[in-house]
Amino acid sequence: MIQPMKNVIVIGATGLVGLELIKQLSEIEHCEKIVAVVRKENSRLNKIKKVQQVIIQDFFFLNDQDVDGFSHAFSCLGTTLKKAGSKDNFYKTDFEINAHFVDLFELKETHYILVSSMGANMNSSIFYSCVKGELEQHVVQSKLYKTSIIRPSLLLGDRGEQRIFEGLSQKIYQKISKFMPKTFKYKPVTAQQVAHTMVVVAQSQQDKLKIYDNLQIQKIN
């Protein structure tokens, strides 16, 4: 059964994908309210119609009542090891906070949609991929009404922060993209493409659980 998208809640709302997602959600006529959970008020979100910012410095303080009555919940929350400063801080954001958010929606009639990552695997020797895989396992094992997991490759877009590896990768991609096939497993995708995928699956997915890989993101767009 497809849940009508009326009231939605988003964490990671100020990031590259989160901001684009909220912009796209705001253009959907029947989407009446968009709650963005943020640590501090964001001026860009203030300019987007239908958005209500819930300011909470520690996301672990989110409780059952805070998330009650939403048709859809979106998590775009994630960081990098460099920005987090340590593996412990990275794990706290990418796994622990996300897992807490997931747990709040157990046994609620809410479609949960998560931005994960290509290569997510809890048995990976790469710490980033391992944490993403552990989170995916937690999501899959939770008692959620409906779940979508989005696994993009490298994300293209202006993050408003310096990420040397991603910046270099984007420059390389711009030079070689014309030689790539239209659908390529590792082809980078834009924040707009990922957000559009989330909006599409939110309105069309019938399966209780579905994982969308990078090729599916490309095809949806």
Image (cartoon, rainbow, N blue to C red):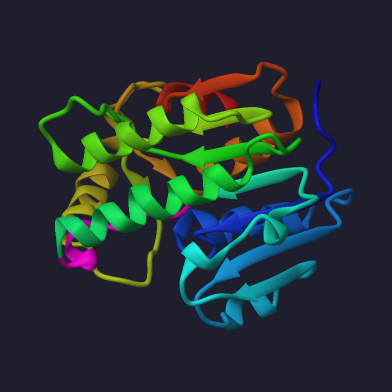
The quadrant of the image that shows the N terminus is top right
**Residue 85 placement (x, y as % from top left):** 17, 67
Q: Along the line of sight, which residue is nearer the eye, 72 or 172? A: 72
**Left or right of 33, for residue 118:** left
Magenta stretch contains residue 79: yes
Above or below 173: residue 182? above
Magenta stretch contains residue 139: no
Residue at 57% across, 82% down: 41
**Residue 168 placement (x, y as % from top left):** 17, 54
**Residue 137 placement (x, y as % from top left):** 39, 27
Above or below 96: residue 138? above
Q: Along the line of sight, which residue is nearer the eye, 179 or 35? A: 35
**Left or right of 79, for residue 151:** right
Q: Residue furthest top?
A: 207
User: Magenta residues: mostly which secondary structure?
Assistant: loop
Q: Residue furthest left?
A: 125
The answer to which image quadrant residue 107 occupies is: top right
| Stretch in magenta | 76-85
